Image (spheres, rainbow, N blue to C red):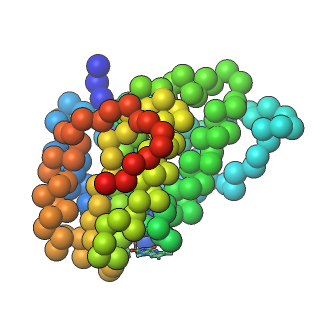
Amino acid sequence: MTRRFLFVLGSARPDGNTELLARRAAEQLPPDVEQRWIDLTAHPLPDFEDLRHDTDHVRPTEGDPALLLDATLAATDVVIASPLYWYSVSAQTKRYLDHWSGWLRTPGLDFHAAMAGRTLWGVTALAHPEPEVADPLAGLLNNSAAYLGMRFGGVLLGNGSKPGDVLKDTEALGRAKTFFAREAPLARFPYEAG
Ligand SMILES: Cc1cc2nc3c(=O)[nH]c(=O)nc-3n(C[C@H](O)[C@H](O)[C@H](O)COP(=O)(O)O)c2cc1C
């Protein structure tokens, strides 16, 4: 089966460290793996509205919500490429994940069954020198994958503050070379750091 990677870019600036690191990792994917890159700033989702207990969610048919839903459903692998903001994902990324909650409750979509068995990955850049401070982001992604019955490939971390800094993080660039080749086991609760 052809693998299709969807890279969801969640930085609030273009050409940032997270994207640079994700692109380094993606360079190593075999040529028969399809790649699609979507920048959430270029394709902003509306604020998520929680309709769970009022009315049915309706499948979006146009605009950025439809683009992101269709791209997500088409992907065998979803890569959340978000900078570390306040020890977690960026607001753009969080909003995208909040929309998953609506998609889970959209009649006829069966988002849960569609996503089960697929793989979630994380790529993040952070300014802080200790990687452990990104544990909340890793936990968020692991637990979300577990909730959906997905596999979780872990988080590729790189260090940097201004754009381009991550290219000086030689350890991160080394990890990027093999990141997508690693085993991605079924995600399990609870997240165990380290
Ligand atoms: C709103 C905001 C929050 C941030 N919060 C953190 C943080 O909690 N921990 C950290 O180490 N770096 C933090 N940073 C620094 C960024 O993670 C760092 O600059 C990173 O390289 C940005 O990724 P990008 O270049 O892909 O945009 C924050 C930056 C911004 C703008």
The x and y percentages for residue 128 are 34, 76
Residue, x 22% and y 51% (percent of image)?
A: 25
Tag count: 0
Q: Is residue 34 above or below residue 125?
A: above
The x and y percentages for residue 53 are 83, 37
Q: Which residue is at the front of the view, 34 or 117?
A: 117
Residue, x 37% and y 53% (percent of image)?
A: 193
Q: Is residue 68 above or below residue 56?
A: below
Going by the image, does 145 lie left or right of 4? right
Instruction: Specify whether residue 7 is in view.
Output: no
Q: Which quadrant of the rendered structure holds the C terminus?
A: bottom left
* Residue at far bottom of view: 162
Instruction: Specify whether residue 146 is in view.
Output: yes
Going by the image, does 88 lie left or right of 57? left
Residue, x 37% and y 39% (percent of image)?
A: 152
The x and y percentages for residue 3 are 30, 29
* Residue at far right of view: 54
Going by the image, does 100 lie left or right of 38? right
Q: Which quadrant of the rendered structure holds the N terminus?
A: top left
Q: Is residue 45 above or below residue 102?
A: below
The x and y percentages for residue 175 are 17, 55
Q: Quadrant of ligand 1?
A: bottom left
